[in-house]
Amino acid sequence: MTASETTGKGPFWLSMEEQILDLGSQDLSGEKLEASIHRIAGELDKAGYNVSRHGGNLMQLRWAVDKMRQAGRPLMKDLNAAITAFKLEDLVDPYLAANKLLDDIGKTWPELRSPERRPDVIEMVEKAKLNLLVAKAKALPGDKGIRLLLAENVTSKVITDKLEITDQTLAQVKAEIKKELAERDRVATLLEKLADKSSEEKVRHLFDNNVSEALIIEMAKVDQSVIDAVKMAMEEELKQKQRLAEEEAAQKKAEAEGPALEDIPPDKMLEYIESIREIMEFSDVEKEIRTMCEQSSIPKSLVDVAVSEPDRLDELEKKAEG
């Protein structure tokens, strides 16, 4: 833990260089130079650093001002410019990025490579990466920004603060990610059992197990053309099954309705007509007549005649008697 972490102040060298950054060329000429040094020392004293009455700290300040005059510009100007120039892709590894930065500007400012300052430079690079990540996250739609920061191992507190979301929202996204990871594990297990199968067989099996198309493409590593071919084949099979089901339903319906009038044998015709007359003596309500006729397995064709043209029963009866 650094002194700045225990005191709550930033590193002395960094606060000192930030004060020097505000100096203009007019502040470094003639008698103004000494006044500028004492003014900065006073500002640092107010910030909690003992500079005016600490020989070592005051000497560091004088050296830093002299170095600025030699270089012709403040250290922080080069350091800020280098950090601002970073793009997110440059900061995949902040330590490597910090090393490159120090190699570049360390030629002019070798003191940045010191054990005292190097960790602070790395921290500045890490902060720059976080700022770029947050900016990218805010530009993403839906919960993609939250997912981005979680994938980068940004702490929950930083995510809720930077994206201005509630703990509940963050918890919901984490739960969804956990569910998605579980689904990926399930699909991976399914694929292990299909290692020796063709791409088409894998896709069909995954579809049968309710795996999403996007996840199939990703995890089974198949092209969209394979997906489309399997879906087309499955659609044809589904249509065939539907046709067979419709034919079976029609057959069952026909069997339930019984034969057409002309296909009823004379002896059965007489038997059915007698049953219908008994039912019609019991009720004259069509729905009840049909229900009781169905229960007695009387052909629907004959029941239709009974309820719509009851007089035809006599005609059919005579014809059946010969």
Image (spheres, rainbow, N blue to C red):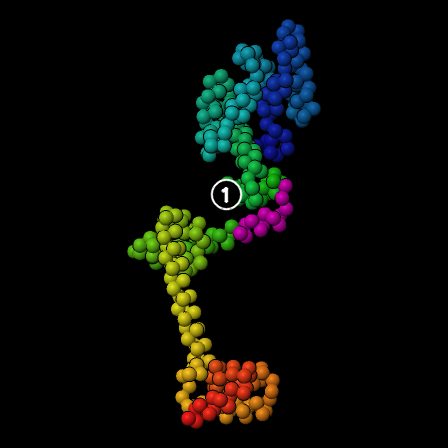
Whether 102 is among the magenta residues is no
Mainly helix, strand or loop, the magenta region? helix
Graded by Cα atoms within 10 Å as few (under 14), some (14 to 19) or many (20 or more), the crowding at tag 1 reads few
Q: In this view, does 30 lie to the left or right of 87?
A: right
Compared to residue 196, the image places residue 88 above or below, namely above
**Residue reaching furthest to the left:** 196
Q: Is residue 219 shown to the viewer in this render? A: no
At x 69% / y 19%, what residue is drawn?
A: 42
Q: Could you say whether the residue bearing mark 1 is in a helix, strand or loop?
A: helix
Task: Give residue 313's position: percent from left, percent from top.
Answer: 51, 88
The image quarter containing residue 1 is: top right
Q: In this view, does 42 lie to the left or right of 290?
A: right
Residue nearest the viewer, comparing 157 with 212: 212
Residue nearest the viewer, comparing 296 with 57: 296
Task: Give residue 115's position: percent from left, percent from top.
Answer: 50, 27
Residue nearest the viewer, comparing 150 with 193: 193
Task: Give residue 99's position: percent from left, percent from top.
Answer: 45, 27
The amino acid type found where label 1 is placed reads Ala
**Count of residue discs:** 1
Residue nearest the viewer, comparing 95 with 288: 288
The image quarter containing residue 8 is: top right
Q: Mark 1 points at which residue?
A: 151
Q: Give the range drawn in magenta.
A: 164-176
Q: Is residue 313 shown to the viewer in this render? A: yes
At x 41% / y 55%, what residue is drawn?
A: 187
Whether 172 is among the magenta residues is yes
Task: Give residue 222's position: percent from left, percent from top.
Answer: 36, 48
Compared to residue 23, the image places residue 159 above or below, namely below
Compared to residue 62, the image places residue 175 above or below, namely below
Which quadrant, please, contains the C terminus?
bottom left
At x 45% / y 30%, what residue is drawn?
A: 96
Compared to residue 26, the image places residue 281 above or below, namely below
